[in-house]
Image (spheres, coloured by chain):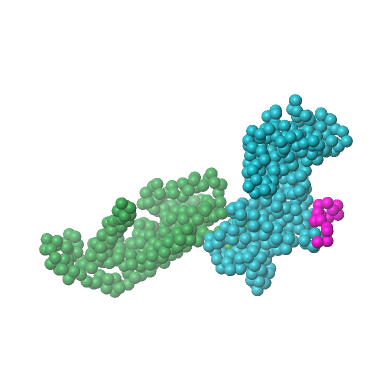
Chain colours: A green, B cyan
Amino acid sequence: MGNTRRLFLILVPYSWLLLLFLVPFAIVLKISLSDSALAIPPYTPTLDLSAGWAGIKALFADFDFENYAWLAEDNLYWKAYLSSLWIAALSTLLALMVGFPIAYGMARAPEEWRPTLMMLVILPFWTSFLIRVYSWIGILGQNGYLNQLLEWLGLIDEPLIILNTPIAVYIGIVYTYLPFMVLPIYATLEKLDADLLEAAEDLGCSRFQAFWLVTFPLSRPGVIAGCFLVFIPVVGEFVIPSLLGGSKTLMIGKVLWDEFFANRDWPVASAVAVLLLLILIIPIVLFQRQQQRQQEAEQ
Amino acid sequence: MSRDAAKARGEVFAPWLDENAEPLIRFDRVTKKFGDFVAIDDLSIDIYEREFFALLGPSGCGKTTLMRMLAGFETPTTGKIMLAGKNIGPIPANKRPVNMMFQSYALFPHLTVADNIAFGLKRSDMPKDQIAARVDEMLGLVQLKKFGGRKPHQISGGQRQRVALARALAKSPKLLLLDEPLAALDRKLREETQFELMDIQEKLGTTFVIVTHDQEEAMTVASRVAVMDHGQLIQVATPEAIYETPNSRYVADFIGDINLIEGAVKSVARDIAEISWAESMEPLRATAPEGLTKGANCCFAIRPEKVSISAERPEKAANALPGKVIDIGYLGNMSTYHVELANGQMVKAQVPNQNRLSRHAFTWEDAVWVSFTATAGLVLTA
Ligand SMILES: Nc1ncnc2c1ncn2[C@@H]1O[C@H](COP(=O)(O)OP(=O)(O)O)[C@@H](O)[C@H]1O
Ligand SMILES: [Mg+2]
């Protein structure tokens, strides 16, 4: 009885994983090993199940790594990967610099305010992500609100060119992903025992030293979780660079999008996606291990 | 001069009796308000060097607030706090020669036991090599030499308590504050630790101020006990004095077990007061405190162990009252008899159990006499 229950409990998440991750991944992997073709779907070979075992063998015989070789040949791709990693790393750092003070302020705010502050952080999720990114075009454009405000304040004479530059991309990314940074940091800071800070002060620390020697090290699990939660999705981000970054911003997500929809080269696009996943698996595994270690420490 | 040395020379450690002694801490008419709520109410007190001073009182009476003002985490609304003759009001917590052991211990979870102890030393100007030696010394003091490399979550509650103590003592503060230091320990460990604390305090000669709501703990460890209620000091005295001569019903009732009988002074003659307390009952006779006036409302207080119990009326007893045994509590070393007097008043009498297996002299419903001398009880007017 107990065994069937346990089996069932294990099976549910694994079937979930199988259905929603492994099966699509296998399909993408298969396409990445195929050749581009003018057909529907736009690649060969396709699996002919009516031929049975022979059909499957024929399928495997036609697979090759041409598309991966192509990724290595054209330096557009590795430049895009590198640029994505770089943009993701820098925006993670920026999000941390903006998010930590916000989380800290929330955790130090009077208890009755905290649910409201939490709501404010989550509130943007209630409107469409796309609309929010579009609205940044209105803010950052040459005649946008930001430039109007700065001109009105007399701080600038010429409008600043922000839209369609990397700066706009960073602004968009930090804005969009900020809650993923704030919430885990807030969770660790909120748990922090106020006695610890008083103990640090009692033992001779200034407020700043107490922050640096106690608050910050103890918020590390939240900082690490927040960084991964921002870094991993940002590497594959394509909406924000497409809408705010103009043509100059090179990101692998955008390249992938173009391969799929502009070039209709599904096999190359799939190869880009598979490689991206392989690159991201390293931080994802690190993240998992960190989570596990944190859980063990808490027990 | 340690207390032991003083004792050996037959001197009693009692600087509070010495008019010339300078107090280490002086609260001078200190009031602390949180909004409209008065947590500490116009409180003045002197605490002397090398004292083990206990603040005792029910939860919420202001003990922690008093201590936090000493540590520098709260500032008095009015009044002054002096440490060694200096007003410490403007000195921030991190600059005071005062350390605190927190009720929650507040050990840094990310640091090892040794690093926790070294934490305060690293903020001081002590050279690095001396810090290691000092940490080692402190680990020895609290018998944790083997545990220096462990993290706080890898040691037991009792060990954590000792790390917190060692950390607070490492900087050799002039004053150590202990907020309910033993509250989280189980009874047996708590009792052992009380004696360890006393040993350490005598060895180092540091002034300790301990907060507790456990009266036995306060009586065991302290050189003087301050009984608090609603932000005020009700009585400050040695444990013996607090127990034997409480100055009010509140203190008498708070410390130990006591019989309280309300009445009025019928007469005062040659130090002996007669207290009428119920119609048709003989008045109680007790030593009159100074200034007791006839007709005043008062309370007669007597500890159960000072009440005797017998089958016949004892001949020479100053006070003897007939009654009936209602309940017997066996405590191992003692038995407590609950005796109901003729008018319904309950009196507790505590009798040592001297012989093993001897049957109780009295049993339920037995008619007995309770008696006590004129000096056994106290007349309280406050
Ligand atoms: N920061 C504060 N704000 C408001 N009220 C407080 C604060 N600190 C303590 N109090 C109140 O002051 C009273 C005394 O508290 P405390 O000193 O902690 O009592 P004790 O330690 O004797 O249990 C309590 O009624 C408590 O609610
Ligand atoms: Mg308290």
Q: Does the magenta segment cover residue B11? A: yes
Residue at far top of view:
B279
Q: Which residues are magenta?
A: B8-22
Q: Nearer the viewer, residue A296 or A199?
A: A296
- Whole-percent x, y for residue A284 in the image: 38, 63
Q: Nearer the viewer, residue A123 or B103?
A: B103
Q: Does the magenta segment cover residue A178? A: no
- Whole-percent x, y for residue B353 in the image: 67, 46
Asked if residue B7 lies left or right of residue A110, the reply is right
Q: Residue drawn 80% across and 59% down?
A: B7
Q: Residue drawn 82% across and 29% down?
A: B266
Q: Residue drawn 81% across and 56% down?
A: B12
- Whole-percent x, y for residue A279 in the image: 35, 67
Residue A263 visible at all: no
- Whole-percent x, y for residue A232 in the image: 39, 61
Asked if residue A5 lies left or right of residue A295, the reply is left
Q: Nearer the viewer, residue A181 or B338?
A: B338
Quarter of the figure with the N terminus of chain B = bottom right
Q: Residue drawn 36% across and 65% down?
A: A280
Image height check: is B183 above or below A33? above
Residue at far right of view:
B270
Q: Nearer the viewer, residue A103 or B198?
A: B198
What secondary structure is the stretch in magenta mostly built from? loop
Residue B343 visible at all: yes
Q: Tell how many labels.
A: 0
Residue at far front of view:
B358
Q: Locate residue A242: give its quadrant.
A: bottom left
Residue at far left of view:
A51
